[in-house]
Image (cartoon, coloured by chain):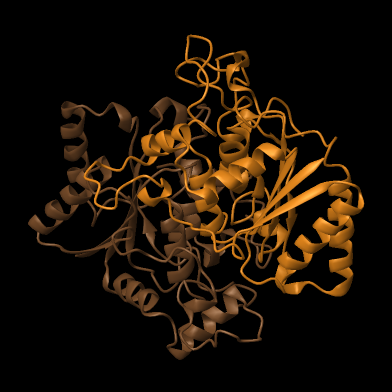
Chain colours: A orange, B brown
Amino acid sequence: MNVLIVYAHPEPRSLNGALRDFAVAHLEAAGHAVQVSDLYAMNWKATLDADDATDRAPDADARFDPSLDSKRAFETGTQRDDIAREQARLKWADAVILQFPLWWFSMPAIMKGWVERVYAYGFAYGVGEHSDTHWGDRYGEGTLAGKRAMLIVTAGGWESHYGARGINGPIDDLLFPIQHGVLYYPGFDVLPPFVIYRTGKMDDARFEATRAALGARLDALHDTPPIPYRRQNAGDYEIPALTLKAEIAPEQTGFAAHLAHEY
Amino acid sequence: MNVLIVYAHPEPRSLNGALRDFAVAHLEAAGHAVQVSDLYAMNWKATLDADDATDRAPDADARFDPSLDSKRAFETGTQRDDIAREQARLKWADAVILQFPLWWFSMPAIMKGWVERVYAYGFAYGVGEHSDTHWGDRYGEGTLAGKRAMLIVTAGGWESHYGARGINGPIDDLLFPIQHGVLYYPGFDVLPPFVIYRTGKMDDARFEATRAALGARLDALHDTPPIPYRRQNAGDYEIPALTLKAEIAPEQTGFAAHLAHEY
């Protein structure tokens, strides 16, 4: 497989750096082709703005529209090179791994900016027809359908803090905006995340165990069952309200209602 | 009151820009002092990195630790000026408003980077003692306790898409990592958010109604009951597991379990 790792940590000599190096070596040893978008090393531009199109005059008097300007630049080939290059990597990849430390319960700003800028209108959203039975190609359909995605996340807190009744909220719910909203939305099959807790207390034994567990997850990248999110246009949702039909999981609300079954 | 608006939109001539201008004028007319951190206009540095301390040699051989380096810079007064200035604004404020468009189900990268860089170790986390009954000053206690905070959020999607059974997930759950994780964590009382949906279909009548509703929310900034999140150290949680005690909301899991009552 072709595997793209999008990686966001400022210090290569960190736990994240060690796990990234391990993942690359492990995947390559298994015969996969690997590319890494190391956002800090690339000095990735985190902020989406008018400079993301190459043909916008600096004194342009037109209003900047984050969405429509992205559409125009994508369609006319006037996106900045860094954006086009990442889109090409996504198209090349059979599997995409986003690896990052959990900062304030989400991805680092530099990776959020990767999503915002690379996910152009026409590339990752705003594709497909709208009708009474189909509300665009998204949530299970889209440009990136057929590819797999997985998060590798490190957290300083304890696993119990992220449990079903833990104070930070359940990790699956904290990651839902990323897994469902960023990855499933443009079509990825999303595998369960690989989460490492309490990173400040990592001794050699746990580090070895973590590497072994990560290796097993990477070995199963091609056949791990994805999180069973419901497809938007497959009959479970009212269109255009995009609410679950009354007979679908009738007792359920919230993120979990968008799973077709437990996993 | 002293009100700080932290604002993230790249185009002043946008709906967000118009609502920001309205909010400033409305608050000032009511006698409040208002400061705006307009992150795009300030060209805010979104990416947390080693340059956030002023005394780090460019060829420093030491590992960069995002958390411990932030602690050292905060304690020794070697934070970059932009960070120290925002911390001073937060201390000045009685109420803080974060205003942003919902991009990929969270705040824009530039604002996420404001959180990551301004929320230094020792300022917004890593404060207070740890004991059998107290796990640091956080979730209801902390440097920013006694202040109020509120989100103003615009979304392109329909309100039903963000409802209890809507495909995007309920807006309260999507905002939980921000409201509970970013705002309540360092001590803010968090007011219910002000959310504007379907921003692409904003006609004059709805714009007027939106401004009126926002004005009413701003008029009530000082006495709106906050979201009743549970305080970490007030007896509801096991310490140090930080899970809800068995007798607290025994049937509940997930984000909603951290509310002491419905609101």
Instruction: Using the image, determine if residue A61 lies above or below residue A196.
Output: above
Instruction: Using the image, determine if residue A140 lies above or below residue A220.
Output: above
Q: Is residue B211 visible in this depiction of the protein? A: yes
Q: Position of residue A221 (x, y in %)?
A: 82, 41
- Give the residue displayed 57% in from the left and 55% down from the top: A107
Q: Is residue B219 visible in this depiction of the protein? A: no
Is B211 on the left-hand or right-hand side of B96? left
Q: Position of residue A117 (x, y in %)?
A: 49, 46
Which quadrant would the N terminus of chain B be assigned to in this image? bottom left
Q: Position of residue B125 (x, y in %)?
A: 51, 72
- Give the residue displayed 33% in from the left and 40% down from the top: A65
Instruction: Using the image, determine if residue A247 lies above or below residue B206.
Output: above
Which quadrant would the C terminus of chain B be assigned to in this image? top left
- Give the residue displayed 83% in from the left and 37% down from the top: A224
Q: So how many labels did they put on this image?
A: 0
Is A186 on the left-hand or right-hand side of B171? right
Instruction: Using the image, determine if residue A233 lies above or below residue B2.
Output: above
* Residue at the limit of the structure toward the top, as seen here: A132
Viewer-side residue, A6 vs B262: A6
Q: Position of residue A237 (x, y in %)?
A: 55, 17
